[in-house]
Image (tube, rainbow, N blue to C red):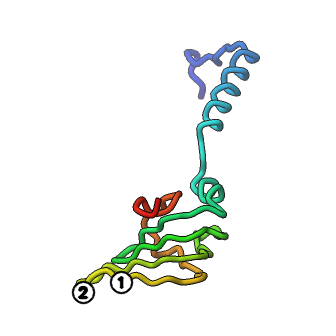
Amino acid sequence: LVSSCVRPLKRNNQAFIMATQQKEQKTNMSQLLPLELIDKCIGEKIWIIMKGDKELTGTLRGFDAYVNMVLDDVTEYDFAEEGKKVTKLDSILLNGNNVSLMVPGGKPEEK
């Protein structure tokens, strides 16, 4: 049963469509998806902070949907109780499961 009080809304369809399209354009222009941001970093230095006591810097060569990454010219920093251990590597494949934070541009003290 439909109540007699319920009436369909009358709208100026063209104005409503234009307003909706403008809202969508504003939203789309300001959105940058995480994988799009990572994609913009390919070929650039990146600083990666891992879960645990490791950090890496290197040049991002590629990644996949799971954020597994290929890095070149890598410096690995391991912060253990014994002190900081630094390891240089030519190239690595990094599992994205253990990544906590990614910072485009490399580590601050490297600049």
Most extreme residue toward the right, as rendered?
A: 14
Side (left or right) of 84 relative to 31: left
Displayed quadrant of residue 25: top right
SS of the residue at dot 2?
Answer: loop
> Mark 2 Cα within 10 Å, few/some/many (few <14, many 20+)?
few
Which residue corresponds to the image point at 40% horizontal and 62% vertical from the top-left?
109
Residue 65, numbered label = none
8 or 31: nearer the eye?
31
Which quadrant of the structure image shows residue 41?
bottom right
Q: Residue at x 60, y 59 (%)?
A: 38
> Which residue: 64% across, 54% down?
36
Secondary structure, mark 1, is strand
The amino acid on which the numbered mark 1 sits, given as a three-letter code, is Lys
Name the residue carrying label 1. 85
Q: Residue 110 location, x and y as percent?
A: 45, 64
The residues bearing labels 2 and 1 have C-alpha atoms spaced at a distance of 9 Å
Task: Pick the residue in front: 41 or 1.
Answer: 41
Residue contact between numbered discs 2 and 1, judged by CB atoms under 8 Å: yes
Q: On the image, which quarter does residue 6 sit in?
A: top right
Mark 1 nearby-residue class (10 Å; few <14, some 14–19, many ≥20): few
Q: Can you give x and y, in whole percent of width and height, for residue 18 in the image?
A: 72, 21
Residue 66, x across and y down, in percent: 59, 70
- Residue 81 coordinates in the image, percent (x, y): 23, 84
Q: Residue placed at 55% from the left, 15% from the top?
A: 5
Q: Quadrant of the N terminus?
A: top right
100 to the left or right of 73 = left
Looking at the picture, which amino acid does disc 2 mark? Glu
Check disc 2 and report the residue beneath it.
Answer: 82
Most extreme residue toward the bottom is 82
